[in-house]
Image (spheres, rainbow, N blue to C red):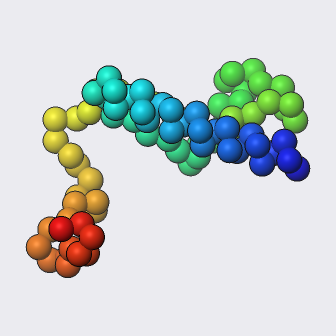
Amino acid sequence: TKAWRVLHLDVGHLSQTMYLAAADLGLGAFITAAINDREIDSMLELEPMREGCIAVVGFGIPAATRTTPEIELDDSVPTPVSLR
């Protein structure tokens, strides 16, 4: 169980390093665990019970316009004092 815990800590550290490297290059980055791990494991020919995909991390040139308004703050939502 310790190895499982350390593995997940390493995934977090590596994904954060990806974010930092992408930011340094002026790129956008993402990480997601909302994946079809069986399909990815099969495509990568990973050995079941020994290897497996935990998450997918990617990066690229950011879009010219943001298309996710649910993360935008506007005047209809009170802005917390700490964000002002």
Percent from the top left, x then y, of residue 10? Answer: 67, 38
Quarter that holds the C terminus: bottom left
* In the rendered image, the vertical position of residue 42 relative to residue 74, given as above or below: above
Residue lying at the far left of the rendered structure? 75
Percent from the top left, x then y, of residue 48? Answer: 84, 32
Q: Quadrant of residue 52?
A: top right
Q: At x 83% / y 26%, what residue is drawn?
A: 47
Percent from the top left, x then y, of residue 2? Answer: 86, 47
Mark yes or no: residue 32 visible: yes
* In the rendered image, the vertical position of residue 79 relative to residue 32, given as above or below: below
Q: Is residue 24 left or right of residue 10?
A: left
Q: Quadrant of residue 81?
A: bottom left
Percent from the top left, x then y, of residue 61? Answer: 28, 27
Q: Is residue 57 left or right of residue 67?
A: right
Q: At x 28% / y 27%, what residue is drawn?
A: 26
Q: At x 60% / y 43%, what residue is drawn?
A: 12
Mark yes or no: residue 56 visible: no
Q: How many marks?
A: 0
Q: Is residue 48 left or right of residue 19?
A: right
Q: Is residue 64 left or right of residue 24?
A: left
Q: At x 21% / y 46%, what residue is drawn?
A: 66
